[in-house]
Image (cartoon, helix red, strand yellow):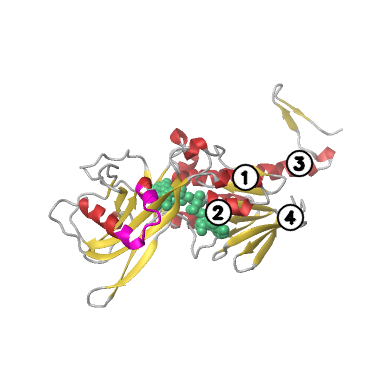
């Protein structure tokens, strides 16, 4: 590592999604000089809310917001649950218990949370006052004698940093790691992420007795449909209902290169088919979004990297994100997996810095080590 022992380590976290936010927040709290970078205009990554504007029939402007990425957060692990409860106490998230369409199998109901009043609010809460540079797309990393530099697509450079932590989907991290850590780059390039086509729509308001449904795969191209305006803290323009409908991974993969117009038509038809017969939808607004790397592909967690995060102390490089770590009983995956990975990377780096500090102390100043077997404190001093 590069920094002098007396100065706080300078850390760059690239990616201001929930993994990068969790990681940066912990490091900042521990006193490190952290800077967060993201290529987008806003923070939150795949925890995203899009604002749409269109003209009504009389020409007046109308706008609505759609949570077009992650819909909600589930938490299985005590540490993440505690973080969400603190966020709830601060008014940042609210519990969400959707009414699920009775005609379809109901999803398992667990404690479910939604950030208020838009999805990036949780990342914003964690990031707090961590210095953050948006619209900074890192094109490559440069390692010199005094540390790491980040080179952006527009040629601007930031640094030096003692450590660089990547908090982004695996394919994007692989590009930045190539030439610096080829083994990691190769492993990440092979991690499979499932795509997702998403329909965002505003229709006439409907007296519809459900807020969400998970249609069966054999009956619909849609995997998860949510009445957006009925989520906590959301609303729709007067007289309208807003919808977010995610296509299944299989349908999205099969139509990955289809035109947005064709996808919009197919998903609109699929949404209309979920209505009781006889209701004709009036579309006030429709748009689609293609997520090329939406969620780790089924089975990816067992086939891919199972550590919660990666850390290379010699290079000062780390990786975190939702594609790392094991899911299943231990984690709900998705947002929880991302948070946990970022939090774990921060802990790992802090422990490594503690070890370095201890190793750099003159012999007589080194702290007492505990002999595990005898329960005795053994002084290292001569
Ligand atoms: C359609 C959809 C529905 C989902 N539904 C759910 C759900 O209901 N519940 C759930 O728990 N999870 C859900 N997920 C998954 C969840 O959103 C993700 O697991 C989680 O948000 C991932 O967080 P992350 O921080 O690992 O990555 P991201 O959120 O992807 O953050 C990565 C960040 O890195 C930035 N970045 C990438 N490359 C660069 C670069 N070169 N330079 C600078 N910045 C860069 C990106 O702009 C982005 O902000 C869903 C995802 C999608 C897409």
Residue 29 appears left or right of 63: right
* Mark 4 or mark 2: whose residue is earlier in sequence: 4
Q: Residue 176: say if magenta.
A: no
* Mark 1 or mark 2: whose residue is earlier in sequence: 2
Give the number of the mark in front: 4 or 1: 1
At a point 45% along the width and 42% down the height, the residue shown is: 333
Element carrying mark 3: helix
* Mark 4 or mark 3: whose residue is earlier in sequence: 4
Quarter-of-image position of residue 311: top right
Q: Quadrant of the C terminus?
A: top right
Q: What residue would you read off at disc 4?
A: 7
- Between the C-alphas of marks 4 and 1, the distance is 29 Å
Q: What residue would you read off at disc 2?
A: 172
Residue 154 appears left or right of 281: right
- Between the C-alphas of marks 3 and 1, the distance is 29 Å
* Mark 2 or mark 3: whose residue is earlier in sequence: 2
Q: Which mark is residue 358?
A: 3
- Between the C-alphas of marks 4 and 2, the distance is 31 Å
Element carrying mark 1: helix
**Do residues under tags 3 and 1 come within 8 Å of each other at their CB atoms?**
no
* Mark 4 or mark 1: whose residue is earlier in sequence: 4
Q: Is mark 2 within 8 Å of ligand 1?
A: yes
Q: Within 10 Å of the Cα at label 2, are there few (<14), some (14-19), or many (20+) other Cα atoms? A: some
- The magenta-colored residue range is 251-264
Farthest residue in the top direction? 374
**Do residues under tags 2 and 3 come within 8 Å of each other at their CB atoms?**
no
Where does the image place residue 258, in percent across and percent down from the top left?
A: 37, 57
At a point 47% along the width and 57% down the height, the residue shown is: 44
Farthest residue in the left direction? 278
* Mark 3 or mark 1: whose residue is earlier in sequence: 1
């Amino acid at each position: 590592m590069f920094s002098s022992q007396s100065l706080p380590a300078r850390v760059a976290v690239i990616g201001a999604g929930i993994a990068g936010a969790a990681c940066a927040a912990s490091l900042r709290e521990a006193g490190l000089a952290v800077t967060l970078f993201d290529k987008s205009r806003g923070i939150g990554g795949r925890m995203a809310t899009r604002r749409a504007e269109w003209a009504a029939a009389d020409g007046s402007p109308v706008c609505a917001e759609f949570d077009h990425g992650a819909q909600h957060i589930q938490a299985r692990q005590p540490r993440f649950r505690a973080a969400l409860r603190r966020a709830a106490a601060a008014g940042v998230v609210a519990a969400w218990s959707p009414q699920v369409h009775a005609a379809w199998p109901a999803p398992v109901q667990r404690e479910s949370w939604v950030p208020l009043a838009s999805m990036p609010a949780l990342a914003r809460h964690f990031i707090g006052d961590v210095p953050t540079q948006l619209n900074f797309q890192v094109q490559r990393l440069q390692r010199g004698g005094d540390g790491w530099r980040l080179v952006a697509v527009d040629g601007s450079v930031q640094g030096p940093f003692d450590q660089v932590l990547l908090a982004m989907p695996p394919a994007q991290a692989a590009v930045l790691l190539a030439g610096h850590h080829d083994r990691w780059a190769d492993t990440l390039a092979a991690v499979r992420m499932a795509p997702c086509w998403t329909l965002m729509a505003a229709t006439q308001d409907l007296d519809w007795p459900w807020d969400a449904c998970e249609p069966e795969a054999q009956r619909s191209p849609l995997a998860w449909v949510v009445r957006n305006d009925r989520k906590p803290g959301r609303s729709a323009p007067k007289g309208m209902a807003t919808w977010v409908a995610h296509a299944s991974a299989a349908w999205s993969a099969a139509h990955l290169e289809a035109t947005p117009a064709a996808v919009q038509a197919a998903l609109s038809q699929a949404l209309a088919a979920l209505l009781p017969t006889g209701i004709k939808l009036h579309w006030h607004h429709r748009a689609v979004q293609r997520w090329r790397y939406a969620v780790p592909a089924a089975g990816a967690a067992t086939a891919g990297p199972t550590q919660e995060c990666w850390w290379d102390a010699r290079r000062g490089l780390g990786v975190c994100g939702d594609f790392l770590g094991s899911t299943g009983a231990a984690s709900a995956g998705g947002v929880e997996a991302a948070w946990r990975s970022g939090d774990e990377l921060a802990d790992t780096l802090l422990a490594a810095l503690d070890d370095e500090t201890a190793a750099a102390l003159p012999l007589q100043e080194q702290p007492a080590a505990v002999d595990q077997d005898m329960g005795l404190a053994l002084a290292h001093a001569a």
